[in-house]
Image (cartoon, rainbow, N blue to C red):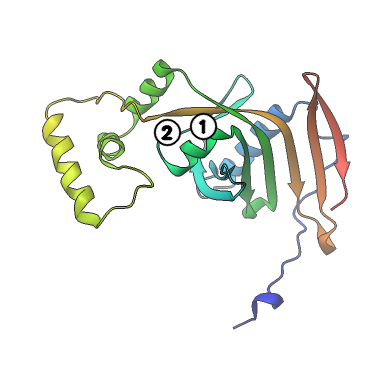
């Protein structure tokens, strides 16, 4: 077995240049996302959501993107979870997508805001019933004594909503929309001389630059 220090890979599948990239980073993201789907990347909508606590400690976890609307990136979660509490105190966050099959990465920085109730409930009720019950049953991020706590909560929720096809959205559950102010596209290249194109939003307009790898 190789040592960790000896694990390395050379990238050579594609390239990226300011001349060819879309001048709208949202459009470019959509193009790359579609290509990731076409390449059958497992869960291409999975990304690392990074937040920061009140005392400055960073935290990251995998979340699923559920839409890109009006230039904003949308995901859903429990507002009382660790990430929800951190975003309430500090709405700045970062999203990182990595599609190794295409040797690509997208880094997004921005500010979150809660989606409106109707949008959150509409998405909540489009989920499988088991997922709806799970959202009601789980006190996400809270310490519990054992798995049986969740099993009992599921039974209680199933009994409470017996015969109800679409459950109402729990108050503690809903969506976030991230308005980006920085988006970087990374394309792996040989010899670690990767292509990095970054967009910064300045006075409401996107500026584009190439970064050294």
Q: Secondary structure at mark 1?
A: helix
**Mark 2 secondary-structure assignment:** loop
Mark 1 neighbour density, 10 Å: few (under 14) some (14–19) many (20 or more): some
Residue 84: percent from the left, percent from the top?
Answer: 47, 36
**Place of residue 26 in the rendered image (x, y in percent of width and height, measured from the top left):** 69, 28
Q: Are marks 1 and 2 in contact (CB under 8 Å)?
A: yes
Q: Is residue 24 left or right of residue 78?
A: right
Asked if 57 appears above or below 28 in the picture, the reply is below
Q: Report which quarter residue 6 is drawn in.
A: bottom right
Left or right, residue 160 beside residue 32: left
User: Which residue is under mark 1?
Assistant: 88
- Residue in the image at 76% along x and 49% along y: 187
* Disc 1 from disc 2: Cα separation: 8 Å
Measured as percent of width and height from the top left, residue 33 is found at 62, 38
Q: Is residue 121 left or right of residue 13?
A: left
Name the residue beneath numbered marker 2: 79
Give 127 or 116, whichever is nearer the viewer.
116
In the rendered view, would you say 153 is above or below 144? above
Residue at 36%, 30% (x, y): give it. 172
């Amino acid at each position: 077995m190789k040592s960790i220090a000896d694990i390395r890979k050379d990238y050579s599948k594609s390239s990226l240049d300011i001349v060819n990239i879309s001048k709208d980073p949202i459009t470019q993201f959509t193009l790359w996302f579609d290509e990731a789907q076409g390449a059958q990347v497992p869960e291409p909508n999975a990304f690392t959501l990074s937040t920061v606590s009140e005392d400055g400690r960073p935290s990251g976890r995998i979340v699923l993107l559920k839409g890109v609307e009006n230039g904003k990136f949308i995901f859903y979660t429990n507002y009382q979870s660790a990430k929800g509490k951190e975003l309430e105190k500090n709405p700045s966050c970062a999203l990182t997508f990595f599609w190794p099959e295409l040797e690509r990465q997208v880094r997004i920085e921005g500010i979150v805001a809660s989606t409106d109730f109707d949008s959150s409930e509409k998405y909540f009720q489009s989920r499988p019933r088991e997922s709806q019950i799970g959202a009601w049953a789980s006190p996400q991020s809270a310490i519990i004594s054992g798995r049986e706590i969740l099993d009992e909560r599921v039974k209680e929720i199933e009994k409470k909503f017996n015969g109800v096809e679409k459950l109402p959205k729990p108050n503690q559950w809903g969506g976030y929309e991230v308005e980006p102010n920085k988006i970087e596209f990374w394309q792996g290249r040989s010899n670690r001389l990767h292509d990095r194109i970054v967009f910064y939003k300045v006075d409401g307009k996107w500026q584009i630059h190439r970064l050294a790898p």
